[in-house]
Amino acid sequence: MKLILSIFTLIVLSSGCGGSHCELDAENYRPRECAIKVASNDGFGPWFSIEGTNANNGNRNRYSDLGRWYTSFTNHVAKGDTVIKRRNELVFYIHKKDTVLAFPYECEGKIIK
C-alpha cells in the first residue's frame, strides 16, 4: 500500500502545470531510507528497484521507488555494492569496493539540501 501511495504522490507532484516542484520533490525523498548490499538491480528509467541484504540487520530487503532522482545513479549500482540513503538526507551513497559515490538531490541545476 505504501508503494502505491508513493507512486501516486510522485506522479501527482511531477505532473503539475509548470513551475518548480523541487522543494516538494525533496520533501518526498527526505523520509526515505535504505542500507542494502545489492544482489539485484531491477530498475529502469525513473523506476528504481534493488534487492539484497540489509546492511544493518542482515535480513533480505527490497527498496523500490519511482522518481527522477534515481535516473542520475541507477546505472552506477552493481551487484555487490552497498547502497545507502539516510532518513532526512538528500544524498544517495553507493559504496563500491574501492570508492564511495555520492549523488545529492539536484533539481533544475541546483543541489537541494
Image: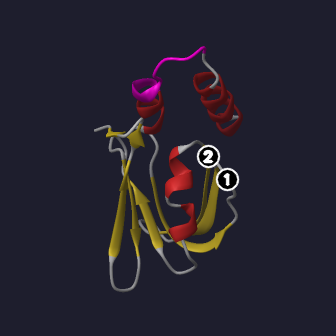
Q: Residue at x 62, y 34 (%)?
A: 6
Counting every numbered tag in the picture gives 2
Q: Is residue 13 magenta?
A: no
The residues colored magenta run: 17-24
Res 59 seen here: no
Tag shown at residue 31: none
Q: Residue at x 45, y 22 (%)?
A: 20
Circle 2 crowding by C-alpha within 10 Å: few under 14, some 14–19, many from 20: some
Please give left or right for residue 82 compared with residue 9 in the image: left
Which residue appears farthest toward the left when viewing the image? Answer: 113
Residue 110 found in image quarter? top left
- Where the C terminus falls, by quadrant? top left
Where is residue 98 drawn, in percent x and y? Answer: 34, 85
Where is residue 31 drawn, in percent x and y? Answer: 42, 38
Nearest the eye: 29 or 101: 101
Res 82 seen here: yes
Where is residue 87 drawn, in percent x and y? Answer: 37, 44
Q: Earlier in the sequence, mark 1 or mark 2?
A: 1
Circle 1 crowding by C-alpha within 10 Å: few under 14, some 14–19, many from 20: few
Residue identifier under label 1: 45
Residue identifier under label 2: 65
Q: Residue at x 56, y 61 (%)?
A: 74
- Where the N terminus falls, by quadrant? top right
Q: Is residue 18 magenta?
A: yes
Q: Secondary structure at mark 2?
A: strand
Nearest the eye: 86 or 46: 46
Q: Magenta segment, principal secondary structure?
A: loop
Where is residue 10 drawn, in percent x and y? Answer: 61, 31
Q: Residue at x 41, y 61 (%)?
A: 84
Give the colour scheme shown.
Answer: secondary structure
Q: CA distance from mark 1 to mark 2?
A: 11 Å
Amino acid at circle 1: Gly
